[in-house]
Image (spheres, rainbow, N blue to C red):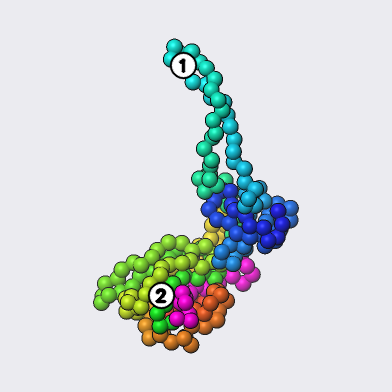
Amino acid sequence: MKIGDKVRFLSEVGGGRVAGFQGKDIVLVEDEDGFDVPMRITEVVVIGEEDYDTKHMVEVKGEKGKAKSVEPEEEPETEPADRPVTFKAPVEERKGGDKLSAYLAFVPIDVKELSNTRFESYLVNDCNYYLRYVYMTAEGTSWQVRSQGEVEPNTKLFIEEFGRDQLNLLEHSCIQLIAYKRDKYFLRKPAVDALVNIDPVKFYKLHTFHENQFFEQPALIYTIIENDRQFVKL
């Protein structure tokens, strides 16, 4: 196994290309989002080198009740995704990441065809805390949940794809966040309840989509909280 090899995980869904190594036991795998995922070398395999063909002998009863041996039969192949997860790499924390920072981002699928393109929305977690989130939109005085779940530290989570016909539904949005860490002590953070007023007109203007540190393409990014300071709130 060497840098540049394409690999897949044995104990969970996913894979990528080898970006480097940490010591003798840990390999850094760059996933499709460009993040380096630390995995034990024993938990990854270079694609093209898998060999799961195993055979075994079985014994069955004949018509008269006597046991007889039969030809070895192939055991069904077990896909890595079907195997029980036995190892999960610990979350890597970064220096200065203990202050909450989170963003709601909108990315055009084809920025060169802005007048016709559809868009993707993401929740970006730029801190060392797990974030339990609820993303909702308002129609009059009533609210509807569009997405809810958990975002791991220092990652971004795809929420949905939408077209211009849904822009008016997103105009009055709200993000609620609860921050925590797992398997360690941490400083408690106040819950976040932030209103995000999304301007549909911005989705028609190329200059509102900017280069940024989270995506390879230009994005429209709304700050929910940054360095523990909530920018938009009720």
Q: x, y (%) of residue 152?
A: 52, 62
- Residue range in magenta is 92-113
Q: Position of residue 87 (x, y in %)?
A: 59, 49
Give the residue type that dot 1 points to. Answer: Gly
Residue at 42% in and 74% down: 119
Rendered image: mark on residue 62: 1
What residue sits 43% from the left and 82% below the top? 114
Q: Secondary structure at mark 2?
A: loop
Residue 184 lies left or right of residue 223; in this view the side is right
* Residue that appears at 47% across and 17% down: 61
Amino acid type, callout 2: Arg
Earlier sequence position, callout 1 versus callout 2: 1
For numbered disc 1, what is the local secondary structure?
A: loop
* In magenta stretch: residue 29: no
- Residue 54 in the image: x percent, y percent? 59, 35
- In which quadrant of the rendered view does residue 170 lie? bottom left
Where is the C terminus found, in terms of image quarters? bottom left
- Asked if residue 189 is positioned above or below residue 172 in the image, the reply reads above
Q: Residue furthest front?
A: 71
Between 145 and 181, which is closer to the camera in this rendering? Answer: 145
Label 1 Cα neighbours within 10 Å, binned few <14 / some 14-19 / many ≥20: few
User: Furthest-right residue in view?
Assistant: 24
Q: Which residue matches tag 2? A: 118
Question: Can you see residue 210?
Answer: yes
Badge 2 density bin: few <14, some 14–19, many ≥20, Cα 10 Å: some
Please state which of residues 204 and 71 is positioned toward the viewer in this rendering: 71
Q: Nearer the viewer, residue 102 or 123?
A: 123
